[in-house]
Amino acid sequence: MEGFINKFSSCSVTRVDTKFRFTLIVFEIALILLCFQAINAESHGQQLQGQSAERGSENIVSHSCIHDQIIEERKRPGRQVYSVTPQVYGQSGNSKPLNGKGRALLGISESSLQQKGAKKPIRIFLNYDAVGHSPDRDCRKVGDIVKLGEPPVASLPGTPCNPHGDPPIYGDCWYNCTVDDISGEDKRHRLRKALGQTADWFRGALAVEPVKGNLRLSGYSACGQDGGVQLPHGYVEEGVADADLVLLVTTRPTTGNTLAWAVACERDQWGRAIAGHVNVAPRHLTAEAETLLSATLIHEVMHVLGFDPHAFAHFRDDRKRRRSKVTEQLMDEKLGRMVTRVVLPRVVMHSRHHYGAFSENFTGLELEDGGGRGTSGSHWEKRLLMNEIMTGSVDTRSVVSKMTLALLEDSGWYRANYSMADHLDWGRNQGTDFLTSPCNLWKGAYHCNTTQLSGCTYNREAEGYCPIVSYSGDLPQWARYFPQANKGGQSSLADYCTYFVAYSDGSCTDSNSAREPDRMLGEVRGSRSRCMTSSLVRSGFVRGSVTQGNGCYQHRCVNNSLEVAVDGIWKACPEAGGPVQFPGFNGELICPAYHELCSTGSISVPGQCPSSCDFNGDCVDGKCHCFVGFHGHDCSKRSCPGNCNGQGKCLSNGICQCENGYTGIDCSTAVCDEQCSLHGGVCDNGVCEFRCSDYAGYTCLNSSTLLSSLSVCKNVLGSDSQHCAPSESSILQQLEEVVVMPNYHRLFPGGARKLFNIFGSNYCDAAAKRLACWISIQKCDMDGDNRLRVCHSACQSYNLACGASLDCSDQTLFSSEGEGEGQCTGSGEMKVSWFSRLRSSLFSSNTSSRGMSVKYRQL
């Protein structure tokens, strides 16, 4: 986390008596050296060069998301995941003047406040100022060599990006710009059009409690990924009018078939994203990719809004308290592997209705666990949702399901408009077994096991084939659906499942892109045609291919009956499906069941509840379990839960209007002073928490497990406590190099170090190292999750030992003065050298308020 600390008084020195003149001159030299080194540290940079063999444009038919890869990169020590910047809403809570870092939130008059908690369509503000303006990351002319990610600087010309290499190199490399990577005026126009349409779509799909006045951002560090984007000064000082979310846009190149990526970089006091970085690769800003780009941008902005494992930690329930459980990871014996499922209430509810899975055996919707580069963990499992927009790959057929909108509503930040959801065919009404069983046990068109026969795709819109691949190595044990361990389906995202995939010319519904219908089989292609199993052939002829057991035939739904036509002759089908014969043809056509093609509503599925619980509760085995605030056998009645707990007024519509200082559906949750989030904390039911888990990849670890990876801090932390540190050992080993030592050098620059050593003082050196360790690796509390800020007394001891003027009142870093040492990290015990005592006695009047700003890294 980037921040600022005040260190050492200003570089002017007060006159003193002559007998101290020599000491004063020496000290002036020290301060000059110190100022010079600190200034140099801020402006120091390295110019890097490199070469790349990246290819030019190609025909991309799908987008591969790399969001999880970005999340992993943001776990590196010293990398900021996001900043917290409090906003003013209708429910101000325990308001006090917000002053911090020289900034204050804009004041809002009480008359402008609407009903508390009321949500309005989300306002997304798009900023294009950074497009084309990063000389080391934007392609300006052919042959430019630019950064992707954070390539190593040790060797030049550097590592070239090579997505086709063995192994492929997608990021942290140097990219060779082609003509397709330059964002000209036409591409910028396409960019603005596509993102404008994306913002409009979300405005219709999501409502949010609107920010009152201007949206304020911190601007303490660059926003986003791959160098990020520096926030405009006006956004920090004045804020952004009429906005609930700011997206900073760039057009930097990408590798492979990744069209774009996006991340959140700032959140409000409730955890909702208020700023994000969206990058769109210029080579994909073409007319041919327009439809795919539209779907891709919706997908990527979903990640910013909350479809992100790191955002899950900040999800709120209806009471506006942190959710105790968003996902559940367990060993699934039927599937034979570990799975992670989303167990949020509305996600589960809408999943039950989509799949017809009302059994108690269904407990949550799976997240992706495969796919390698950037897809695992922050997408729906493709095996179960196939062309849903939040699976790991996006194409022109991708649709937004109710499950995705439900996940965002379950965050507690949004109200979803489910009429904006598309119709998802995959898995519809397939039952609980579809979700809980291996795919080789699926039925019908959802499973195939031979390449010798064609078949119908799952939605009957096309004729298809069964792609079975022989891989060079064995598949995972759980994915071995064939006797041969290396055989499986073509998609690792879909768990190597085998199912019918449409022929490129096999569409039954699109007569323009499909091959000519076979009149000898009685086929017709068009909007009313569907694929059906058939052995029909005109009398006197034989079928040319025994492997083609299907065809495209017209259908219609009349008088509660499914009818199909062959050669212009219509016949009614059995309701449950079955064979039908036609005059002039040998063989038979197998009709689908009526509900497959004719039922517009939900079909009767075992375990369904009355009125679908009015979509205000979860239906399990025929019984409604109502959400908070709803009751009745079908959850159709609304009432104030707990009579608003005596902390609000129950309105006639059954909604609580909470008193000032309380929030949530039942007014049971206390609101923190806004100073909490201003100091880097997160409020949970009136308690200001500084959670270790708020940092991606960090957790509270026993100090004994850390010591073997540490050297500088080994004797500082102690072995009888827990500290907030990276959970991965490889990252932990980099912690001192990447975080601790830079903090140490900022606290004790080289020029000052030499001067202090001349006077025989090791006390400042020891104090700087101790403080650097405590800033970088903070203790955890007794509960094992909250990190404890550095003790105020530890800051004062450092100031005394080094003659510095660190701002100990900065509560983003240091505890309040009244907190005991058991409630914070570090201690105030420190010996002070004669030189520091002399300096303190001479300049005590000048060290309390003035200082120069030095950046540090926390965590």
Image (cartoon, rainbow, N blue to C red):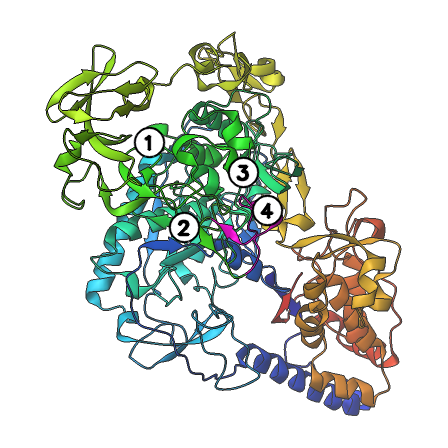
* Boundaries of the magenta span: 473-488
Q: Pinpoint residue 144: horizontal percent, then vertical percent.
A: 35, 80
List the residue tagged with mark 3.
Answer: 366
Q: Callout 2, which amino acid?
A: Ser
Q: Find the distance from the CA under tag 2 to the CA under tag 4.
A: 36 Å
Residue 393 marker: 2
Q: CA distance from mark 1 to mark 3?
A: 20 Å
Vertical side of 185 occupied by 802: above or below: below
Counting residues from the N terminus, which is met first, the one under dot 2 or under dot 3? 3
Q: Residue at x 24, y 43 (%)?
A: 506
Q: CA distance from mark 2 to mark 1?
A: 18 Å
Of callouts 1 and 3, the N-terminal one: 3
Q: For the residues carrying marks 2 and 4, which lies nearer the camera in this image?
A: 2
Helix, strand or loop at disc 3?
strand
Numbered badge on residue 742: none
Q: Are marks 2 and 1 in contact (CB under 8 Å)?
A: no
Residue at the disc numbered 4: 677
Please give the name of the residue rendered at 14% of the width and 31% of the height, measured from the top-left corner: 540
